[in-house]
Image: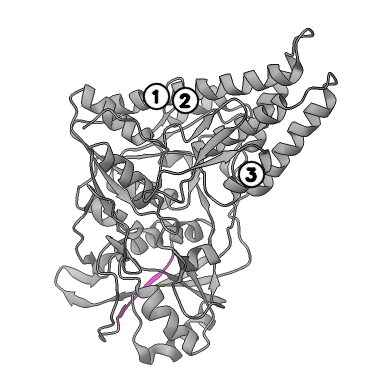
Amino acid sequence: MNSVQSPLFEPVLWEGGGFRILNEISLPEQIQYISVKDASQAIDAVREMKTRAFGQVLTFLYSGALLAQNYHAKEIPPLRESIDQLTHEFCRARPTFDFRGLGQYFDEWFEKLPGNVSAGEWISERACDFAAQIVRARGARAKRAAELLPDPARVLTHCNMSGELLAIAQHCATMSKDFAAIATETRPYLQGARLTAWELARGGVRVSLIPDCAIAQVMARGEVNAVVVGSDRAAQNGDIINKVGTYPLAVMAKRYGVPFHVLVQDPRSLVQGSDVPIEERPGAELLSFQGRQLIADASIAVRYPAFDVTPAPLITYFIGFDGVYTPESFRRKYQQQRAPAPSPIKDGSKYLLVYGIPPLDQRDHLVSALKAERASRFLIPEMRPHMWGVHAVAPALLEHNLPMTLISDNMIGFFFARDEISKLYLYYSRLDPQGASGICGSLLALELARAHGVPVELLASDSVKRLSIDSDVSTFMGRNICPSGASIFPLESEVIPLGVV
């Protein structure tokens, strides 16, 4: 392992008269920076996912610093109004992220503003100093996380923690702890493959890649002894909001007895996770990859919730900038008022979740099932790595004009948590004394249904062999997504115990 820091650890760099944003969309093919001289460029970069996670924090702080630095009048109110408007525009760009909380730091600095200084220059310096403090604090937080991990550490992670997982691995090395990681590919932007697996392999860390739907399989096989994820936001009651797919990871960790650790920050005024609006991004972002369409019918319905909420009871330790907390000690430190019991959030829809490949002659049965379950649509995951949902299930349903919505595999838990799935139709390929064998992700779908009290119907799948250009997680739509130095975790067909269906 080498000691080279990931460029994602400090993805935005201040340069005095402006700043540079690491373009995360261009990784790993190119390490490319976007030069920012105006805050509108920064807002576009955030909206277009060219920077995310910690990059959004630095982008906001440096945008405020740039705006203040360019303000030379003596009057204070216009500058405060400009910062407030900047905060509003960032919130519009990514509504789930806590830009409003970051904006409150500027409010605090205005309250402390000395009377004999240039307001713009002073505020700009505070913002840049604060950004530098956070960068240093992330290094200390990574060391705390490393101290918490067992030896050997076999860590499962999701999405990307902006360089901090590599820092954790490097701290483990100094402690003589053996460290290896399994990264989910993290659809639809593939941050796990393009960013996490890339930066770990580049740093000399052993890392293997799995599809999002394989998390139950690797935990059931005992391949993981810790889960470590980041959080875009934390609430006073201990709920966390992170990249969609984090919640099912936590549910599976609880199911298989794997500690689930989260890197967090000060929750400020957020009382509970359900208070946060969950951003739904355009479905077109799920339906295309490097300029190619996933499915021929562009009119297909798609849902792309970008985040999900993980409740505090599913979390083992919160690893903060100032210490390590249990759910109880985290609440004692931060909770200012008791959070009301959250009620399930619904958009009025009820789905029948289909996992596996239904036989071609089951159209009438599926139509009857919609009526019987009072559901409005079928919910079809992509079913990586072969993309059976895209290549086989969705086209068959569309051919018969059956109502369906396509999602990525890591979004299944989001719909279970919101009580929007009325039944799981789980298709198996063969039966034997051990149970029913299904495609990758069958075990995850089953365990999520069980955890949420959703009935499961087990059915024989289509026996027709269908072609797929992807045979494992090394490729997506036939194009390589596995970075050099990373390996592909060997997956197996998943056994569904008949006694639990």
Q: Measured from the top left, where is residue 412 in percent x and y?
A: 44, 61
Residue ranking furthest to the top: 116
Magenta-highlighted residues:
454-461
Q: What residue lies at 30% left-to-right and 58% top-to-bottom?
A: 214
Neighbor class of circle 1 (other Cα within 10 Å; few <14, some 14-19, many 20+) is some
Residue 135 is marked as 2
Residue type (three-letter) at the residue carrying disc 3 = Gln
Q: Are marks 1 and 2 in contact (CB under 8 Å)?
A: yes
Mark-to-mark CA distance, 3 and 2: 23 Å
- Relative to 216, 320 lies left or right: right
308 vs 161, nearest the viewer:
161
137 vs 364, nearest the viewer:
137
* Residue 155 showing in the rendered view: yes
> What kind of element bears circle 2?
helix
Q: Which residue is mark 1?
A: 139
Q: Split into 4 quadrants, where in the image is the C terminus?
A: bottom left
Q: What residue lies at 24% left-to-right and 53% top-to-bottom?
A: 218
> What kind of element bears circle 1?
helix
